[in-house]
């Protein structure tokens, strides 16, 4: 049964920062596709999971929150700022791990890529690269510093994307399917990092165990909120729906 009731107040753990993320009556069209039509969401919790089939709108929601896409109507604000202005006004506010690491990585080596995350702080480049080396060493990854990005596997590149976000340490972490290519140890490390992060984290995933314990999980379906509530309940409802569709052989690619 769809769960659309609001979370009990006790289940909501507000993020430390003052004003929450707000999506107000947003319409988003990409090319010929209508992605969102009248979407409204308040996102104040410290941990929020985003689930749903391929094409449901998870990445599109992240693109709105980090200002990469601008809605045709409605508004998206992050801590009181219009999302599309955040990268210029407060570059340290929002950071995102892209679903595809190759959309994120710019520099040829790991240390250079990580150093990029320190540039909004005004740190000189040489110092940033040496700090990136120290950071990699602290994670047991000193040997990665001079590795050419192109010589890393997909999962390793995804790991680099997460490290780049960790070292940059923005106030809001948007993680779009960050577990997708990671091996089991990599998933465990990332789950540990997320649990320890002092920032607000929004994470989309098909690996429901990584968000099942969250106080809030949102299930998107064709650009609409199908369910929004406790992680355990929403994940169970989604799994039941998938199981029913499998049984009815009513599965489709969108
Ligand atoms: N660049 C694009 N141009 C037009 N439509 C797109 C583009 N990217 C995604 N879409 C469409 O937007 C919808 C939501 O996609 P997306 O946000 O990527 O879903 P999810 O991340 O949940 O898999 C889908 O119908 C998809 O086909
Ligand atoms: Mg996606």
Image (spheres, helix red, strand yellow):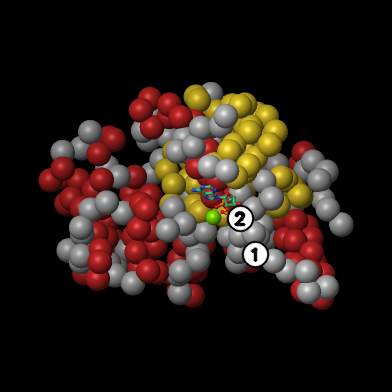
Q: Residue at x 61, y 55 (%)?
A: 55
Q: Residue furthest front?
A: 32
**Quadrant occupied by the N terminus:** bottom right
For the residues bearing labels 2 and 1, Cβ distance under 8 angstroms? yes
The disc, 2 or 1, on the residue closer to the chain's N-terminal end is: 2
Image quadrant of ligand 2?
Answer: bottom right
Depicted 60 relative to depicted 141: above or below = above
* Number of numbered discs: 2
Q: Residue furthest left?
A: 126
Horizontal relation, residue 167 to residue 129: left or right: right
Q: Residue at x 38, y 58 (%)?
A: 101
Q: Quadrant of residue 231?
A: bottom right
**Can you give x and y, in whole percent of width and height, for residue 89 in the image?**
38, 25
Disc 2 and disc 1: Cα gap in Å? 8 Å
* Residue on which the image places disc 2: 55
**Can you give x and y, in whole percent of width and height, for residue 116 in the image?**
25, 45
Depicted 127 relative to depicted 54: above or below = above
Q: Is residue 223 visible?
A: yes
Q: Residue furthest right?
A: 1
**Quadrant occupied by the C terminus:** bottom right
Q: Residue at x 45, y 70 (%)?
A: 182
Foreground of the two, 139 or 6: 6
Residue 253 is marked as 1
Residue 126 is marked as none
Depicted 165 relative to depicted 232: above or below = above
**Can you give x and y, in whole percent of width and height, for residue 219 in the image?**
70, 52
Q: Residues within 10 Å of mark 1 (few under 14, many from 20)?
A: few
**Can you give x and y, in whole percent of width and height, for residue 126 in the image?**
12, 46
Helix or strand or loop: what does disc 2 sit on? loop
Q: Is residue 61 visible?
A: no
Horizontal relation, residue 170 to residue 220: left or right: left
């Amino acid at each position: 049964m769809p769960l659309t009731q609001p979370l009990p107040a006790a289940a909501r753990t507000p993020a430390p920062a003052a004003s929450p993320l707000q999506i107000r009556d947003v319409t988003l069209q990409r090319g010929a596709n209508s992605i969102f039509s009248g979407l409204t969401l308040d996102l104040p919790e410290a941990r929020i999971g985003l689930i749903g089939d391929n094409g449901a709108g998870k990445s599109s929601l992240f693109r709105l929150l980090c200002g990469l896409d601008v809605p045709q109507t409605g508004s998206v604000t992050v801590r009181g700022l219009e999302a599309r202005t955040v990268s210029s006004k407060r570059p340290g506010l929002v950071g995102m791990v892209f679903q595809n690491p190759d959309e994120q990585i710019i520099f040829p080596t790991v240390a250079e890529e990580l150093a990029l995350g320190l540039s909004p702080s005004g740190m000189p480049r040489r110092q940033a690269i040496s700090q990136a080396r120290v950071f990699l060493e602290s994670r047991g990854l000193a040997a990665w510093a001079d590795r050419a990005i192109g010589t890393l596997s997909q999962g390793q590149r995804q790991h680099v994307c997460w490290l780049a976000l960790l070292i940059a340490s923005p106030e809001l972490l948007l993680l779009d399917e960050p577990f997708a290519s990671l091996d089991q140890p990599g998933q465990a490390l990332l789950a540990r990092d997320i649990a320890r992060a002092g920032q607000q984290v929004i994470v989309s995933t098909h690996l429901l165990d990584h968000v099942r314990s969250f106080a809030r999980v949102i299930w998107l379906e064709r650009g609409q909120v199908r369910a929004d509530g406790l992680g355990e309940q929403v994940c169970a409802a989604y799994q039941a729906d998938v199981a029913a569709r499998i049984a009815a052989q009513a599965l489709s690619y969108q």
